Image: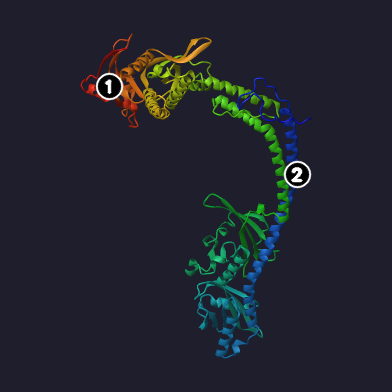
Amino acid sequence: MPWPRRPQGRPSGTRQGVPPRHYVPQTGWTTSHFAVLGGAAVLTVALCFLIVAGLFWRTGSENTRQLLREDAARQLTILENTLDGHFRRAHFLAGSLARGAIGDIGETTADTARTILITAVSSTQGITDVAYLAPDMRERRARIEKNGAVRYLLRDRSDAAGFKQFTANLKEATGTVWRGPYLSETAGTANFEVWHPVHRRGAFVGAWGVAISLAEVSRSLVRFKRATGTTPFLLRGRYQVLAHPSLSEPAPTQAHGSPLLSIDALADPVLPYLWASGERIFGDETPNDRGGDRRAVAREVTLERFDGDTTHHLALYRWNDTLGPSPWVAGLWFEADIYSRFDTATLRALGIGLGVTLIACLLLLGKIWYFGTRPVERVAGAARGLADRRFETDAPLPPSHIAIFDQLSHAFARINRAQRLIETYVPRKLIRDLVRSERDASPVLEDDIAVMFTDIVGFSRMSEGMSSREISRTLNEHFALLGRAVEETGGTIDKYIGDALMAFWGAPERVENAAEAACRSALRIAEVLEASNRERANAGKPTITVRIGIHIGPAIVGDIGAENRVNYTVVGDCVNVCSRLENLASDIIAKGAATTLVSEAVRHDLPDGFECKEVGTASIKGRRGNIKVFLLRSGLSGRTGPAGEFDEERQRSDRTDDKATPRREM
């Protein structure tokens, strides 16, 4: 199938927005060709994408789980080694002292015993107390104070609460005995003690005790957190905290007698939700199985922040029965989305695959859009503009390789031109009203309508020295100024009669106050004519002044005329009165570009901000009674228009006659 050639440029004899008179439709691919080609290509690319994405996702998922298991084992091993170092030092020191590595304190002098204890507590890092308990329950103890000094204590423990039972347990024990946790008397931190009994020839001769500060263990967790970027923790059971980076200093609750904090009282965002809402990813919970394989357990904790966003945290821990007297939980947590933790190589391969697939899809979709979708969008936009009566731009639909779209572009260009021509002869508001209402014609209605007539003063004399082209240009410029002033206030231009203009308010669109809108338009006409006259005077052209008449009353508005030719117009007594008011304005001597006379009905409907001056009464031929006539001077803006500036001589004559001007026949 040959590829159609794109038409070059615009056919001769045409201009933008206007089709040639003899249009030859373009031949080329139809929408069926592009539909089949685009559909097959999209299906192929989509199938390849799904296959590749599925393979990469499966591989990535397996790698993620394996990575989590390896990371859990590695991080927990490092953490447990760090914690094990503290407790093993205590075990080792207590056992060494019990075996007499430094000496038998029970057979030495008091000074030698003091030296042995102080040397033992000072030489081992992380140890706060070293004590020796004799069979008579007298205790010698060396303690490192908060300021770093070593204090030697000699005291009788026979009266200490629970110490007799503890001593009895030591006499029966053959290995390590744990004591605590308890609050240190001086530092205010939670401590554990490891005691090792000493037997000679089957008899209990004493026991050595070594105290471990949990605050020192927490300080080691602070260093671990800085090194790994994770938050480590050590729990006793599920809910009591032994060590945590935030407990490197005594907590307030510890200072009031509680040796261990609960996870709910800890300044940690994740631990309070670890057991309550954490979702187990892998691993088995075996806290009571002291002979278990101690597999790592992973839980995901999802938290909602104050701004409504959510964060995912992964907690890795293991039940440990070698660190203390009961199973403890050693673990750590970090902020991570487990579904995005792919292996680096897998992630790179997936990115490359997705990138290539997306680029191919974008290129293909771009071609389809350029040759198919874009013309459809333009045709749809042109159709919406036709339905909404929007023809403000001259941009035509461009030619297309698709024959039907190329034909549509030329068809819409013709419709555009036809509609523009229609709008120059028929009021735009009327067309839009008919389109919105979906009526074939505008119904004839009777309503209160405000009518305006304008006429150029002395236009016949002005045009005597002007050519036909100059007369046409002058009138077109003049009516353009007046037309904008009418449409700005919601009015409809009925017709142009020589140098006169007829407009009305209240149809086809409703106006809240038709009389006010008409008067606003008159003041606007005076304003724009003043500005135009200044330009004309500077150019050496004659200035233009107009007479304006405005009246409001019941009138018939709608399509008037024969079956095959109608005009949308206003007829009735209201129109006749308005025409007479415009003629009467020639009898008023006023300065400025416009003299505006309004009827008493108009004056009655105006709000308080408008200033009108009564200039007399007038009788209308063919109409009984007289009407009061008012000169419009200013509007709600407080600005006095040119129509409000009276000739001084006229003002003097008005002051001598309280009844204003005499009655006039029209």
Pointer 2: residues within 10 angstroms few (<14), some, or many (20+)? few
Asked if one can make out residue 501 in the rendered structure from this viewpoint, the answer is no
* Image x and y of residue 533, in percent: 40, 27
- The tag on residue 51 is 2
Residue 227's x, y, as percent? 62, 66
Task: Compute the Cα span from label 2 to label 1.
Answer: 89 Å
**Residue type (three-letter) at the residue carrying disc 1:** Glu
Q: Which mark is residue 70?
A: none
Q: Residue at x 72, y 49 (%)?
A: 352
Q: Is residue 639 left or right of residue 20?
A: left
Relative vertical location of residue 633 with respect to residue 119 in this rendering, above or below = above
Quadrant assignment for the N terminus: top right
State which tag comes first along the sequence, 2 or 1: 2
Q: Which residue has dot 1 on it? A: 614
- Picture quadrant where residue 274 is located: bottom right
Callout 2: SS: helix
- Relative to 458, 212 lies left or right: right
